[in-house]
Image: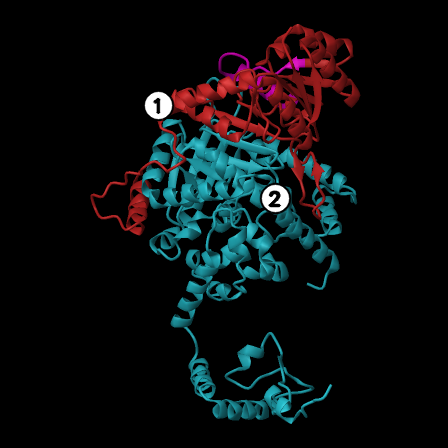
Amino acid sequence: MTDRKAFLASVRQALGRRPGDVATPQPIAGLSVPDDELERMARQVREVMAERAGGLLDEMAEAASRAGWVVHRAVNDSEAVEVIRDICVDSGARSVLKSVEEPLLASERLDDALAAAGMDVRAMVRPEGTGAEVEKAMGELRSRVFEADVGITGADYGIAETGTVVLHPRMGLSRLISLAPPLHVAVLRKGDVLPSLDELFLLERESHVQGRLAGSMNLITGPSRTGDIEGAIVTGIHGPTEVHLALVDRSG
Amino acid sequence: MADPRLNSALEYVFEGFHKGRISAAAATTDWEAQRTLGRAIKEHTIAHLDYYLGQLADNVTGNGGNIFFARDAEEANQYVLGVAKRGNVRTVIKSKSMVSEEMGLNHALEAAGVEAVETDLGEYIIQLAGETPYHIIAPAIHKSKEEVSGLLAAKSGGERMSRAEDLTMQARAQLREVFKRAGMSVTGANFAVAESGSIVLVTNEGNGRMATSAPRIHVAVMGMEKVAPSIADMSILLRILIRSATGQRISSYVTMVNGPRRSDEEDGPEEFHLVVLDNNRSRLLADPAMREALYCIRCGACMNACPVYRKVGGHSYGWVYPGPIGAVVTPALTDLDAGKDLPFASTLCGACREACPVKIDLPRMLLELRAKAVESSGTKAEAAVWRSWRAGMTGRSKFDLAARSARWALRLFARGGWIKRAPPPLRGWTASRDFPLPAGRSLRARFKRRKPERGK
């Protein structure tokens, strides 16, 4: 704590504060949202997501494909299962890892379809408890995620402005599953698309104020890219070379 | 700069980023409004930096993380080394961080026997080559494909690849092995959020995500100016940063980390540390004329727009931050003598101010720094020259006499119309450039001798 005290004292001195002066920042004009307004604005955002669900899904499809996603449309879950199976078959995948936070992925339907196509499909879920056995199991999962051909996840939100898929890693949704395998498939549902980054961070702020902010958040927009060798854009340096987005109109 | 490949690669990155920035800005209907809001956030935060840093510290700690305030690079390095030692860490993976370059962290880690591996492909390439970054967004843009091929092949003892795709896959395989065994990661932070104790990382490659997922310990290092008040500020700051850096609407990955892995999370680092660095930034903060240098979000747009940077390149600035912003912050952040000349390496054309997403008035600050440099230095000979210059410029006949004597005097030192070595004390001036001999007769003298043409 001594580091903090001395450091902040020198910042105060640089700002020209006198001893006893307390910094009381006023809200930034046109920017800061008061906490009591936040809830109302967040409600409006959710209304817009529901009312404009169809239009936002179309905008998402367009922006995502511009951003490097291969976009697929499915009217329902059954069609989505077929879409995912075809993506895996076309890529020549043998081992598939999936998260289980999305109902479609938690179901056995998908497992059956992939197994029938000759693939090894597993859920990536942390074993319960602690200790050496759990550590060992985690180590195995870790090496599996680095070796899998495909990782499948859901999507907490889409962002129509940028073609972004938003994920909050949590139990049943590893941080690595959308990153380590060379191919990532994300399943996004109608009604979960936000107009822009502004609405996303407004909802995040609401979560924070309500004390339920997730441990981390990933915004994923297209494949992993680099331009570091003579400026040529190449995909797949650390994350997936190829990313697919399955847009689903309704469940069932 | 006679290498044609280097020139074309540089043109690609500068033109590509520069034009990309302009078209991305044009596609944002309210780009000017976004810039204005971005600047307002920075102005507000820096004016209340003590408040927001305190709030950030409370919330990082509240999230179960650790925060360390380092007054200089040495203190920051010692802290990071301490974390590595306590965690029995042998290998550290690094995601791109200009602040860690500023700290000289890799050297400090290597000196303590800890392997430090850069994971941004460009940084990895220059680390293999034993060099420093050329550009803050495209660090290895000066290396040819052939050079990269040689470096990667030498690393793995494998065959030499020639296509950029194959080279990238070779690097992926090499770095995967490091990700798997590294016990700790060091990343930068593009932004930190005071109200939630979060940090935000922007990458296209995904190394920032890997660094915040795979290792057991995550250490983020940042300059103290990177904090912002609210989560809600992130949409604006991300938009202006990314569009200005690469011309993308958004980068492939943006990661917000709110502390170490929680019990309800599948995976993630068990330890989180945030190191906040001053390293003379408080000098900029204390000087009202220089304070806005702390609004910089390190997008690199001023470099891509700068005609001088585009000619001389990133290695000519002598320290970590090149281009116009480098010329402004280097003299304050370092005590290097080299930094004193940097404010003169600019034409004051204003392109940097135009490009800056938070409207930093770089030309004004460069002028301030020039004035300071002249006040505090300047040789007696230089002062004498300016005195006689003033004497010679204050009357027509005095000017003509001065010009005639200068032409005569200069001819004594010229060979073939050029002066390659001026006499002392002016020798320093011709050390790195030649001075052309003025024409034999002045324009005015020629004009007087010309016969008027009439009657056409």
Q: Position of residue B408 (x, y in %)?
A: 58, 93
Label 1: chain letter: A
Can residue B189 be seen from the camera position used here?
no
Which part of the image, by quadrant, shows the N terminus of chain B? bottom right
Is residue A143 a member of the stretch shown in magenta?
A: yes
Name the residue type under label 1. Answer: Asp
Tell me the SS state at disc 2: helix
Picture disc at residue A36: 1
Q: Is residue A17 above or below residue B442?
A: above
Range drawn in magenta: A122-144
Which part of the image, by quadrant, shows the C terminus of chain B? bottom right
Label 2: chain letter: B
- The residue at 34%/45% (across/down) is B47
Category of crowding for the residue at label 1, using alpha-carbon neighbours closer than 10 angstroms: few (below 14), some (14–19), many (at least 20): few
Q: Which chain is red?
A: A
Can residue B16 be seen from the camera position used here?
yes
Picture disc at residue B246: 2
Q: Is residue B351 left or right of residue B45?
A: right
Q: Is residue A213 above or below residue B426?
A: above
Q: Nearer the viewer, residue B182 or A30?
A: A30
The figure's colour scheme reads by chain
Name the residue type under label 2. Answer: Thr
Category of crowding for the residue at label 2, using alpha-carbon neighbours closer than 10 angstroms: few (below 14), some (14–19), many (at least 20): many
Is the C-beta separation of discs 2 and 1 under 8 Å?
no
Q: Residue furthest front?
A: B455
Tell me the SS state at disc 1: helix
Q: Which chain is cyan?
A: B
Q: Residue furthest left?
A: A20
- The residue at 41%/33% (across/down) is B230
- The residue at 53%/31% (across/down) is B255
Picture disc at residue A63: none
